[in-house]
Amino acid sequence: MWTPPATPMAFPKGYVWGAATSAYQIEGAWNIDGRGPSVWDTFALYSGKIADGSTGEVAADHYHRWKTDFDLLKTLGVGGYRFSLAWPRIQPTGSGAINQKGLDFYKQLLDGLAERSIRPAITLFHWDLPQPVQDAGGWPNRDTANRFADYADIVFGAFGDVDADWFTLNEPKTHAFNGYWYGNHAPGLTDPNAAAAAVHHQLLAHGLTVQAFDAQGVKGRVGPVLNLTPVSASDPAAADQTKNVDARENRLFLDPVLKGSYPTDAIGTENGQLPADPAQFASLVKEGDLKTISSPIGVLGVNYYGVAGVDLNGDEVQIHPTSTAEWEQIWAPGLYTLLTRIKREYKKVPILLTENGIPDDLLQDGVDDPQRIDYLRSHFQQAARAIEAGVPLEGHYVWSLLDNFEWAEGYTQRWGLTHVDFTTQKRTPKKSFHWYSTVIAANAVAPK
């Protein structure tokens, strides 16, 4: 077992330390300045869908308080900030007319980051699908990929001179599985075949967007953000089930993007597979689709939170301690395992850790968050270890800059480096904020 050294672990010069957010979780201003409705605006109004009955209509009010939040970034000392653009703010119906006020808002953000010498990492889609696009079928409808490519063209036309790390989609797995299979995220469907279609059409949208990026000569580099989860058998007899879960959770997304093919063991009726019809899924994959999906990327975003065990039923089971988000099994060495696997099994591409974090212990006070410091320290150490092993890891974005609207959990989980009082909107940096600033300043992580 690897033991962290007794001295600080240094990172390469130019390593990007950052923080991350997403539009729906922090912006608020849901019906202001021409923004159209998203699937999350609709979903949050259904009784029982959000743990505390809340919505993202105000959230952290970043739309009106972005200067304060960017000053927090400057104080923190980050070199990068990852955020998302709200498709319904830029193109309210998901097609046709452009909302100039939406573009103007994001121009303000980009100018504000430039003034503070912070590099933008821009995500084009973080789950807030325009409601009219969902009404027309959503991601199970192939036309949504084309609509998304049109939206990307608009963004690249407006901001293509911005040197940034551009990300096409955030966690297509979570959006497809939770939104179309499990039903606990917007739009709330429970159809495995719809989920499988949503996987393919999101990946197709990714590929079309990469092609648009290249065609427009956009500055910077482009790639997807994939949430990846190392899995291991909780029972030695569950090897086959574990392989299926790995295919479903990881290779279903890595393989088409980086190899130009889908794994054959991700979808089907075996334990651990996505229980959709393989023939129906295959019929969705038209000639040329995989070539489009595997268009060369310049960066791979990886979201890492934890690991999972797999039992004989192919179900994910607990094998490590969890955070207060019970799905998050904490095992920092899993990050090293994941990163070295990508290096070993796939073609070389620069990697950014685009999300990594933990929610507060709800028993603590507002700013004393020692468990977040411990979590980040151990994961920074594993990141440094991976770099020493030759992984082309170039940066680390902590989730999240601010406490925010945590999807189906509403405001019952706080993931921020900064405490937000959602009544007054007062921001208060937590102890982890100050600790992280020392890591950034040193470009090194010290032992506990």
Image (cartoon, helix red, strand yellow):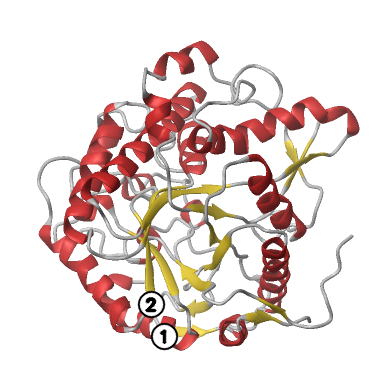
Could one spot residue 403 in this view of the protein? no
Q: Marks 2 and 1: in contact by CB < 8 Å?
A: yes
Which SS class for mark 2? loop
Vertical placement of 265 versus 391: above or below? above
The residue under label 2 is which amino acid type? Answer: Ile
| Rendered location of residue 237, percent (x, y) | 88, 28
| Rendered location of residue 171, percent (x, y) | 49, 46
Judge by depth and name the residue closer to the eye, 101 or 6.
6
Question: The C terminus lies in which quarter of the figure?
Answer: bottom right
Quadrant position of residue 145: top left
Q: Which residue is mark 1?
A: 74
Callout 2: 10 Å neighbours few (<14), some, many (20+)? many
Numbered mark located on residue 214 in the image: none
Which SS class for mark 1? helix
The residue under label 1 is which amino acid type? Answer: Lys
Residue 444 shown left or right of residue 92 in the figure: right
Which label sits in the foreground, 1 or 2? 2
Q: Residue at x 79, y 57 (%)?
A: 321
Question: The N terminus lies in which quarter of the figure?
Answer: bottom right
Q: Sequence order check: which comes first, mark 1 or mark 2? A: 1
Q: Residue at x 29, y 33 (%)?
A: 144
Vertical placement of 202 versus 329: above or below? above
Q: Residue at x 61, y 86 (%)?
A: 442
Could one spot residue 302 in this view of the protein? yes
Numbered mark located on residue 118 in the image: 2
